[in-house]
Image (cartoon, rainbow, N blue to C red):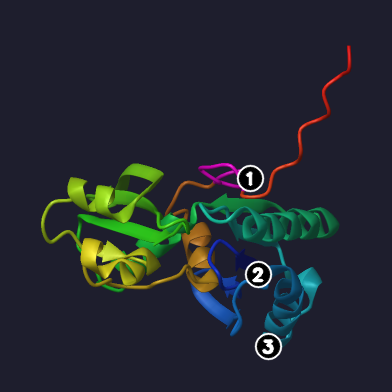
Amino acid sequence: MLLALDTSSPQVTVALTDGDVVVAERASAQTMKHGELLAPLIAETVGAAEAIMTDVTAIAVGVGPGPFTGLRVGLVTARTLAHVLQVPVYGVCSLDVLAAEARATGAVGDDFVVATDARRKEVYWAAWSGGRRVEGPAVEKPADLAGRLAPGTPVVGEGAALYRAELGDPVGPLRPAAGWLGRVVAAEAAELLDPEPLYLRRPDAVAAHAPKRVS
């Protein structure tokens, strides 16, 4: 079975999948508590599937784009578990996961955009055409993104929900779901990446510069 987890959004989501079948899936009711909630959710999901951790044969993790702290929690956990269990770990752009769900469920056609919350009154976004990502991921202000879109372009994701005036009403899922992440990896329906964070910009908190030498 494949253990999938995503911490790129304010919500933690975990799933166990067997091919394209979601065996068990959980999402946190609370937000912005990735460090506190991820490990208990993994245990709860594995327990709900009546499985044990040694049943896991691979791990999938959303690599963002997303906030520094949330991504770090998910990626460190995924890499650590993969090392302990001696199984492979696959990273997937979280925007690709939203796009795959939107297309599979018929929420969008060939041409659409995925936009998620980047904070600072910006969105992370990417564009799809003909079943493949043709632009992005990038970070931009909603009004600037709207200016480059053709009228009526469907927008998937929480970015549209937050900035309806600029991007219109959202279609399809708002946040990445671990169940769909697992399906994407099983089907190799998106580019499989190294489990490294896709930040797109510097973190809010940075280390202080070293003191200057006194001459």
Q: Is residue 61 magenta?
A: no
Q: Which mark is residue 79?
A: none
Residue 171 left/right relative to 198: left
Which residue matches tag 2?
1
Q: Is residue 191 visible?
A: yes
Which residue matches tag 1?
196
The reply to whether callout 3 and callout 2 are in contact (CB within 8 Å) is no
Residue 97 drawn above or below residue 14: above
The reply to whether callout 1 and callout 2 are in contact (CB within 8 Å) is no
Residue 148 locus on image (x, y percent): 20, 45
Q: Earlier in the sequence, mark 3 or mark 2?
A: 2
**Circle 1: residue type:** Glu
Q: Is residue 199 magenta?
A: yes
Residue 32 locus on image (x, y percent): 62, 71
- Residue for point 52% across, 61% down: 186
Q: Earlier in the sequence, mark 1 or mark 2?
A: 2
**Label 3 element class:** helix
Residue 31 locus on image (x, y percent): 59, 76
Q: Which residues are magenta?
A: 193-203
Residue 95 left/right relative to 169: right
Quadrant in which residue 178 is drawn: bottom right
Q: Residue furthest top?
A: 215
Q: Which is closer to the viewer, label 1 or label 3?
A: 1
Which residue matches tag 3?
48
